[in-house]
């Protein structure tokens, strides 16, 4: 077991798969990688169900959990979900209704504008508590500095804590906070991201760790879709890779068929780094959704308001897209990185892990031949 | 001599150094890399002088030339330099004068707004003719598809033709045009660049070449500042790397001391992809120059107009910066990629090549240990 991450979390091959889908998590871990369950969309009860399913289907292999405990929100902790929803300006509600109407959908299809799901800081903690009753081997914080309660929970339960960063400065804060693993994600990656590209971010974060006199493994994220890239990142000093987009084009994923077809058709230039989904910059497949907001000249609302508005609408659009609605098919989108340009087919998550292993070996082989 | 580029251009180590400075070109080639002279700023007479100097100082090692023969310009071929200059709107001239005044500089310092240097398509050809009277081993076209005359000249003189691309679609055009080498530069790179990041662009271009049934080596560019990154790119399938920014922080470079200090201080987040220098998107160190244009609300003019306006002004600003003018020190900028965040000191170009070799070996070593 030569890999550093093998020692730390027990996986055979340091390929970390972030997914909102339990099937992907289990399939990746069974194949030798390390599945990480994105928990942010679940209630504590739902998460309990998902993790129990994973425990039953993962053949004893290790897996992790990803929660989101933001440092700063536009919304304070004590307000109710309805109060949050009432903070969305009527102009924005009206425009969202207009988008739905153009898809032939009624507002009812996206009620109550997500009101019941207003995220709060305590939700993240509750999800974490659920997770810690399962044999998780890693807990990650998706955005912002890992809070002290997370670091303490990690120590108490002997579970390493990982944190995602998009810039050297953020990595330095995480080192101070005491995280065990840094996931450095370049701006080409899907979901929330910064502007620094992976190929620069990885050595910059490694430099910062070295200068801080710390010894923390770094997982490379952002644009990584195959094993040759993984070999490349590890030659640069990464301890492994953390991938999200590549799993979206697998048969197990939560994505629907229309979106998967869009992934296969897309090039690397078909993504956009936009605030018009969550309220913070996140990279997504560029579709009519972004064009409509830009044409309307409505700047994105802060998180979580933008998300409360967009997520229910986009879910209704997804549903209509699957049912053959052409306008909805044009608008449907999802978080995905520039690596979408490398997707050529939809395959199984286990096969993706196998392809990564072969690509990794091929990358090493190429270097060996060059050196020989 | 195991490297593919060694066979093609005769260098020991496939590290390609793009530089406007003959000293860097000669030093890199002498150290085992491959210097490429950026010729675009020279007259044919000046270029002749530079190449003669290189021939005298390169110890018989190979080097190349980079010219710019744009496909499309805002200016037609037959107009005079003065006519081109007259196309610059007075509002833009006035604002440039205002910037100079704020630096305590007179307009005379930047006369005649570059009028005598209006680029034209024939200049690129003339520069190429000069170069072909020297023992150049590679000729590169910096922007757009390599024109037929360049491909023909390459065949006639037995000199491989390279072309820079920032997207898969551009690579496909270059393959059709018949180039021998593709330099795929990610959007994190300095100078003219696209939006696709290096880590995605390299496999995407390699895929496109494979799908076209072609067999063309790809050099990876954009963000590459050290040998570990080089090993990473080659594990991904690149035949070598093409670097620009890293040479700007060398003692031999054309950059001045104030800018080099800014490079050492900068992080990867201190660059900007802006049209406010050449008229096309190019990545530069973000300074007060960009802030002033943005605040003025003046969108960039097309190439070459923006360049004719900005270059003489920025040269005057550079001169003043070196002479201790604080406002000029704030405004001075240059083309540089996000990799600037990895620059920790100014060193010699030969030392940079040596460091690359060591980093390359270390990257390979890391992979070997992981595999073992």
Image (tube, coloured by chain):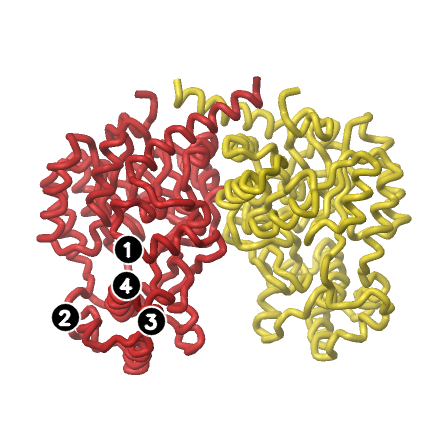
Chain colours: A red, B yellow
Q: Quadrant of residue B183?
A: top right
- Whole-number angstrom distance, CA of label 1 to CA of label 3: 27 Å
Q: Is residue A238 above or below residue B372?
A: below
Residue under label 3: A301
Mark 2 Cα shell of 10 Å, populated few (<14), some (14-19), many (≥20): some
Chain under disc 3: A
- Quarter of the C terminus of chain B within the rendering: top left
Q: Quadrant of residue A131?
A: top left
Chain under disc 4: A
Residue at left offset 27%, top offset 57%: A71
If you read the primary sequence from the N terminus, does the residue marked by circle 3 or circle 4 appear first?
Answer: 3
Q: Nearer the viewer, mark 3 or mark 4?
A: 4
Residue under label 2: A80
Tell me the SS state at disc 2.
loop
Q: Quadrant of residue B30?
A: top right
Residue under label 4: A318
Mark 4 Cα shell of 10 Å, populated few (<14), some (14-19), many (≥20): many
If you read the primary sequence from the N terminus, does the residue marked by circle 2 or circle 3 appear first?
Answer: 2
Which disc is residue A256 wearing?
A: 1
Image coordinates of residue B103 in percent, x first then y, are 70, 67
Left or right, residue B204 beside residue B136: left
Image coordinates of residue A335 in percent, x first then y, are 35, 56
- Quarter of the N terminus of chain B within the rendering: top right
Tell me the SS state at disc 3.
loop
Mark 3 Cα shell of 10 Å, populated few (<14), some (14-19), many (≥20): many
Image coordinates of residue B241 in percent, x first then y, are 61, 36
């Amino acid at each position: 077991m030569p890999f550093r991450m093998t020692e730390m979390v027990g996986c055979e091959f340091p390929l970390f798969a972030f997914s909102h889908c339990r099937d992907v998590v289990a399939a990746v871990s069974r194949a030798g990688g390390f599945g990480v369950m994105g928990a942010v969309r679940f209630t504590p009860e739902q998460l309990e169900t998902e993790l129990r399913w994973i425990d039953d289907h993962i053949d004893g292999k290790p897996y992790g959990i990803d929660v989101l405990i933001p440092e700063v929100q536009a919304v304070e902790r004590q307000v109710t979900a309805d109060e949050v929803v009432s903070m969305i300006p009527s102009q924005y509600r009206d425009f969202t209704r207009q988008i739905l109407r153009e898809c032939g959908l009624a507002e009812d299809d996206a009620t109550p504008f997500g009101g019941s799901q207003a995220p709060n800081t305590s939700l993240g903690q509750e999800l974490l508590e659920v997770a810690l009753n399962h044999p998780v081997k890693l807990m990650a914080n998706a955005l912002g500095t890992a809070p002290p309660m997370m670091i303490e929970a990690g120590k108490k339960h002997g579970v390493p804590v990982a944190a995602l960063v998009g810039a050297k400065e953020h990595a330095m804060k995480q080192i101070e906070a005491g995280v065990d693993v840094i996931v450095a994600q370049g701006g080409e990656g899907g979901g929330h991201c910064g502007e620094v590209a992976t190929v620069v971010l990885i050595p910059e974060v490694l430099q910062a760790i070295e200068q801080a006199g710390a010894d923390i493994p770094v997982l490379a994220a952002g644009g990584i879709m195959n094993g040759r890239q993984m070999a490349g990142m590890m030659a640069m000093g990464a301890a492994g890779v953390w991938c999200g987009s590549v799993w979206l084009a697998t048969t197990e994923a939560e994505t629907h068929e229309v979106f998967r077809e869009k992934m296969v058709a897309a090039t690397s230039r078909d993504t956009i780094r936009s605030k018009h989904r969550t309220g913070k910059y996140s990279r997504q497949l560029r579709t009519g959704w972004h064009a409509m907001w830009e044409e309307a000249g409505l700047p994105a609302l802060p998180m979580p308001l933008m998300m409360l508005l967009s997520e229910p609408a986009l879910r209704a659009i997804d549903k209509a897209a699957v049912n053959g609605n052409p306008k909805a098919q044009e608008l449907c989108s999802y978080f995905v990185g520039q690596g979408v340009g490398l997707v050529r087919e939809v395959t199984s998550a286990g096969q993706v892990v196998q392809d990564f292993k072969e690509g990794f070996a091929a990358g090493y082989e190429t270097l060996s031949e060059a050196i020989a």
